[in-house]
Image (spheres, coloured by chain):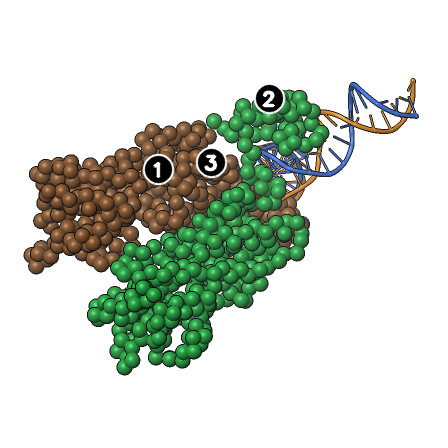
Chain colours: A brown, B green, C blue, D orange
Amino acid sequence: MKRATLRDIARELGVTVATVSRALKDYPDISLATKQAVLATAERLNYTPNPLAVKLRQQAYKVVGVVVPDIVHPFFSDVISGIVDVVEELGYHVILSQSNESYEKEIRVTQMLHATGVDGLLVCLSNETVAVDHLRALQDYDLPVVLFDKTSAELAASSVVTNDFQGAYDATAHLLDQGYTRVAHIKGPTHPENTRQRFAGYQAALTAYGLPFRPEYVAECQAVTHAEGAAFAQQFMRLPEPPDAIFAVSDSVAIGAITALKEMGRRVPEDVAVIGFSDWAVCELLTPSVSSVAQPAYAIGRRASELLLREIQQLRDEQPVEHSRVVLDAVLKVRASSQRPESNPE
Amino acid sequence: MKRATLRDIARELGVTVATVSRALKDYPDISLATKQAVLATAERLNYTPNPLAVKLRQQAYKVVGVVVPDIVHPFFSDVISGIVDVVEELGYHVILSQSNESYEKEIRVTQMLHATGVDGLLVCLSNETVAVDHLRALQDYDLPVVLFDKTSAELAASSVVTNDFQGAYDATAHLLDQGYTRVAHIKGPTHPENTRQRFAGYQAALTAYGLPFRPEYVAECQAVTHAEGAAFAQQFMRLPEPPDAIFAVSDSVAIGAITALKEMGRRVPEDVAVIGFSDWAVCELLTPSVSSVAQPAYAIGRRASELLLREIQQLRDEQPVEHSRVVLDAVLKVRASSQRPESNPE
DNA sequence: ATCGGTTACGTAACCGATTTCGGTAAAATT
DNA sequence: AATTTTACCGAAATCGGTTACGTAACCGAT
């Protein structure tokens, strides 16, 4: 069975395709009789307009491209879910690509998306990415780009990110509220802005609570892994005055630290409290359950696509395109690993 | 900056678009001089063909639609990752939709994908889906459909699934090899074929090892949750002769069972061994680490898209379209929760 | 009878490429 | 010198819609 076209309907009724087109789109200049006849045969032939023809004429792809470092990562699949839900409501579709955290591949897929045809791009920069000329080049072709999570100040574009500073502040403050006084931090590498913000939030909380910043209580990850978390936990415990709480830059690091602490005979949270970042599903299932800072992934996806769709619309209407930076609050999820038992019957 | 068109190049060189088009595609009838001139100005103007125009002319969307129940689920994001990697190599793109495990929404999104324009569809049926008329209707429009994971025998289509039978058999056999003799099974609801296969594999292993099938050792989940796993573990332990091993239909059920067993003072795996299914990332991080049967998600995505692309090609070449059913082996991941300590120094 | 104004529809350009069919010139053949 | 061949390129149809513009028919009013 072939897809019916306007021509098929027109031939059956002895009118031109123009008349059929107008009848289907409820133009005023069509008599009720022909309008109904057209609608009836369109229904009968199961007509759906050829999307390519419409898009070519309208110069609109009705597609947004999404580039993430890794589709499999739970954070990104959550973001994608939010994106899909929003854009589908407006009849747009999502084309998905991954950069595998490679700057090279990021350049390749963004160019490919442009060549393939998209109305806009939602991009989370790879960890390798520092220069953003490849994105600026796309903007020169009037292609709106919205960044999320991993962004860059170098690019004049809207962006949506988690409030890492506030999340880290809340986590640290929570530990201090629980009565822990020697709070250490396992930070991430300096490059992604996010981890710098988390470090800053940690420091700000210490300052707000009138506590000194102790350099020996800060360790810096390279790969941000389970193993690094374990290694730094051991390093901390060898200090003359070991910390009684650890705020880790990620859940994997936090879980690695907890594993190592348990092996060293330290109880969590009685001897050492631990908080992670990202709120992976595992956190609830571990013993003890792991406190963490949840990033609003789904909301990030929604907000980012809303911004992008707005810019696409503004561009089409030849209005000035407004950029905005949205910072969404992180939510502290308090679980067993950071609750001082004595403080429970408070 | 506007995107350059064939017309732009033609105007600059004083030739027609036909000549430019042929020069760019290395047609024989073009002189070396004009060919080089065209290539040079195309390069200079940064020309990329308008994808919509090409696709309209070629009657090919170069897009495959993917429908999964839930993008966020780690299994599906793994599958999607495999799909994206394969189709991008052939210049295709992926449009993503989710059915949210709703039959209604599955119908909506598949029709929407057809209307939007795709060359083929990769679908994992929702749990609610029994009838497949909505997919058959699309096949009538010469749209190839390949099913994966949750499939249906009602539809004449290629499919790619995990060998649930073999995975379940291996898991059960492993428990029996470890010296456990009273192996129970927490099965899923009867509807999805997958869980029936797992049950059958469990039974087959018992038979192969000459053990009787004991109905009291089988429980059936409805929602396949953590809580159900815990409840059935308790139920099993109340039996006069409780099982010494549990093979669960999913990791969440297995983890729920382990939690309940520990609360009842049973040691895992000393008193009761437990194996799950799906090999979630959590399994490695829990204490004890949880044995599980890994589904080859990424490979499923790859194979399914390979089959789909083949069918798309066959359809375009007007060759007969061949359907095939691919069954990929599951891989048993043995971890602490199923290893009898006595059997280690064997 | 002429004019202005609707109503309802056809004509044709257009979006940007691909491709068939010719057509014109120069070169080669008779 | 007439004819055929070859090389190279233009004209135009096509994919399937959208839409500005034109026009025929009919109305009532002058």
**Closer to the eye: label 2 or 1:** 1
Residue type at the position of mark 3: Arg
Q: Position of residue A182 (x, y in %)?
A: 11, 44
Instruction: Identify which residue is drawn at 29% across, 39% down.
Output: A222
**Closer to the eye: label 2 or 3:** 3
Considering every residue shown, the one lying at the far front of the view is B346
Q: Quadrant of residue A181?
A: top left
Residue type at the position of mark 2: Glu
Q: Tag 3: Cα neighbours inside 10 Å, few (<14), some, or many (≥20)?
A: few
For label 2, the residue is B12
* Chain letter of the residue beneath label 1 in the structure image: A
Q: Which mark is residue A127?
A: 1
* Chain letter of the residue beneath label 3 in the structure image: A
Quarter of the image for the N terminus of chain A: give it: bottom right
Could you say whether the residue bearing mark 2 is in a helix, strand or loop? helix
Q: Quadrant of residue A123?
A: top left
Distance of label 2 from label 1 (alpha carbons):
42 Å
Q: Quadrant of residue A225?
A: top left
For label 3, the residue is A108
Q: Position of residue A253 (x, y in %)?
A: 26, 47
